[in-house]
Amino acid sequence: MARTSSRSKSDELEGLWTRHSAEWRDTAQIASFWKEAGNTDPELLKHKVKGDFFGLLSKLRISLLVSREYEHLLLCLSSDAGKPQISYFPLPHPSGVTVDHVRKSVYVASTRNPNQLLEMRPLSGFLPRLDVESEWRPGIPCPLIITRSLYLPGCVYMHDLALINGVLHGNAVGHNAVISIDFSDGFKRVWWPKCIENERGPVFEQNHIQLNSIAAGKTLADSFFSASSTSLAKLRPGHEKYPVDRRGVIFSGRTREPVCTGLTRPHSARLNGKQLFVDNSGYGELVRVTDGKPEVVARLGGWTRGLCISGDIAFVGTSRVIPRFKQYAPGLEVEKSICGVHAISLKTGKVLASLTWASGNQIFAVECMPESLSTALPFSLKRNSEREKFVFYAFETDSAPSGKRMKPHKSTSAVKTGRSSKTFGEAKK
């Protein structure tokens, strides 16, 4: 009896250890530190295109990074001679995205508790290895790879990201302030509007105004910031009865006072030269600020959030309206709201092309980067685990000049593994 019991316990432990050994093998799980990352629903990537959306990306020679926060996906949209290329990286609730062209890096905010700031850099080549045979092939996409992560307290509630005078900044929505961020030193509050100050000083302890985006200028004083209100009131953002209609503003970095009013839940303020644009989310609009007043450029069928500008074309994200927050969108037909990205002519206000996701929900950021920097993220709809393992096993990133890609060292004594060693971008046959 004791011997049988001992064998049963041994078998139980063996099964437990075998399960443990099999866990955390998916590269998507490990790269994002998120166990469910290996189970991305392919329905979330199914899309429809209206107009020559990918041809436009090809003409502009850009890739688009799109954060779909409630589906926990960072997407890259790019074009290969007009042919759609869609790749992704699973992340917990991604929000703000910004591109550092000097350092050839991309930064992404992940706003679950705790917050994370992620640095991504493009693959440049592979480390010399004897246990796999690597081969670099010209024209293969260089996916962005996570190279650093900084954890921040959840109460920071990080939203938009921007580079100001070469320094990374973000909206600390939970502090009613803008912060500078450093991977060594953490964060520091560097700007806030006058309206959060009272006789005891600035109120940093609770979100009151939903200070959520940055139109980055050369300095903080030259920048602008959007918020849902200017009131330190009992009802706060997130409450179903929080008043929003026409209460949104844009603050001047210089005066810390509103320079534009009459907006409804504004997001994604951006400067294009000297012109200031913002998504007037509650009315599904892209607006230009002229003489302190919002001037409608285009109206779209969804909650506008996410904005980047390339030349005279604006790429604007639209989201579905979350049912419990339908009162936040008084200017929209809630049931008809769509999730997508739309290319809009800033000259005419015409929608030139759109990409929409039938199963899509919420978009936070839309950011463009030159295709010379990168055209992909590590994962695609037709996943190739062998290719992914190779990329993460031996990747190199560096600061090679844009458009130039490093060739990996080829060892004359490389050991073949008996299987093909595919690089990123090759289709599994």
Image: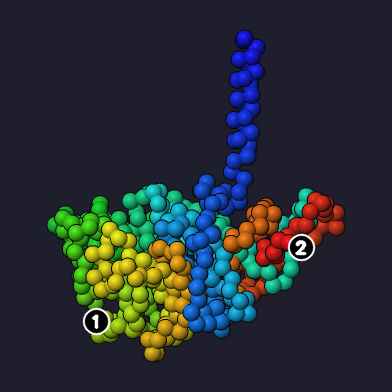
Left/right placement of residue 386 relative to residue 75 reads: right
The one nearer the camera, 358 or 79, is 358
Q: Amino acid at mark 1?
A: Gly
Residue 135 locus on image (x, y percent): 76, 63
Which residue in the rendered view is the most extreme toward the right? 412
Tag of residue 292: 1
What quarter of the picture does the N terminus occupy?
Answer: top right
Q: Which circle, 1 or 2, is nearer the viewer?
A: 2
The residue that mark 2 highlights is 135
Q: Residue furthest left?
A: 199
- Residue lying at 41% horizontally and 58% vertically, measured from the top left: 70
Task: Find the residue positioned furthest to the top.
Answer: 1
Q: Secondary structure at mark 2?
A: loop
Image-quadrant location for residue 124: bottom right
The quarter of the rendered structure image containing the C terminus is bottom right
Judge from the rendering whether residue 398 lies leftward or rightward of residue 422; answer left or right: left
Q: On the picture, is 351 further left or further right than 49?
A: left
- Dot 1 or dot 2: first in sequence order is 2
Q: Residue at x 37, y 86 (%)?
A: 349
Query: In the structure shown, which secondary structural element does the residue marked by tag 1 occupy?
Result: loop
- Mark 1–mark 2 Cα distance, whole angstroms, equals 56 Å
Horizontal and vertical percent for residue 424? Answer: 67, 63
Q: Amino acid at mark 2?
A: Glu
Circle 2 packing at 10 Å, graded few (<14), some (14-19), many (20+), is some
The disc at residue 327 is none
Question: Would residue 357 be visible to someone looking at this image?
Answer: yes
**How many discs appear?**
2
